[in-house]
Image (cartoon, rainbow, N blue to C red):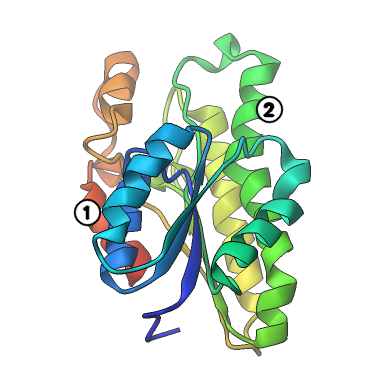
Amino acid sequence: MKNFSGSNAILTGASKGLGVHIARALAKEGVNLVLTARSAEALEQVRDEMLSYDVKAEVIPADLTETDQFDSLTAEAEQKLGPIDILVNNAGIEISKPYEEFSPDDIQMMVTLNLTVPMLLTRSLLPGMLERNRGHIVNISSLAGKTGFPTQTPYAASKAGLIMFTHSLRVELADTQLGASVVCPGFVSDDGMYARVEERAGPAPKILKPTTPEKVAAGVVH
């Protein structure tokens, strides 16, 4: 997809942080948006801003860890906007502490939201994209998924899985007009995660140097 003005996108994790910057970058390109996250009030504020870019913007509040709802979420999104051309899997969670301090629930929650949710939501949208032979999946991973970092073990493992999921899907879709991309930023400078990790584990390796949310959002558009 090269010219996606007028396309329809679902963006997860759209209520705050990096999600707002991605929504803004897509809206500036003329992409209509379905914004989803848990907080309806925060989503509505983002939607109101997106409408100023002369695109359609709809809100679907959802707890994505309830993974049995994706088919209904997809159906509602298509009812509101029409066929979905772009999926940006941005929702995720990071917990930073020594591995032995993680509870089983902590680990399960990170793997579910960071890896299982993108895989299942992609699976829900892919048949329609294949039928139309049009679509693109963008997964937001992390450089932590390419290199180990202390206090980030479950997070890094889940993000590494997301990278390989994207690579495998991209190969599988090679003979179609569909695409799959993965964006792997270092620590995003204004989301608070970098400061928390530095406090626990010291300065990050150079490969994990901070980046800005604007640069990540531009990477998504690219």
Mark pair 1, 2: CA separation: 30 Å
Q: Is residue 82 left or right of residue 193?
A: right
Q: Is residue 53 left or right of residue 100?
A: left
Please provide percent x and percent y for residue 106.
Answer: 61, 20
Q: For numbered disc 2, what is the local secondary structure? A: helix
Residue 10 appears in the picture as rendered? yes
Identify residue type, mark 1: Glu
Q: Is residue 149 left or right of residue 156?
A: left
Q: Nearer the viewer, residue 163 or 45?
A: 45
> Height in image: 45 above or below 109?
below
| Residue on which disc 1 sits | 214
Pointer 1 or 2: first along the chain: 2
Q: Residue at x 46, y 77 (%)?
A: 7
Residue 172 appears in the picture as rendered? no
| Residue on which disc 2 sits | 108
From this viewpoint, which residue is outermost toward the top?
Answer: 101
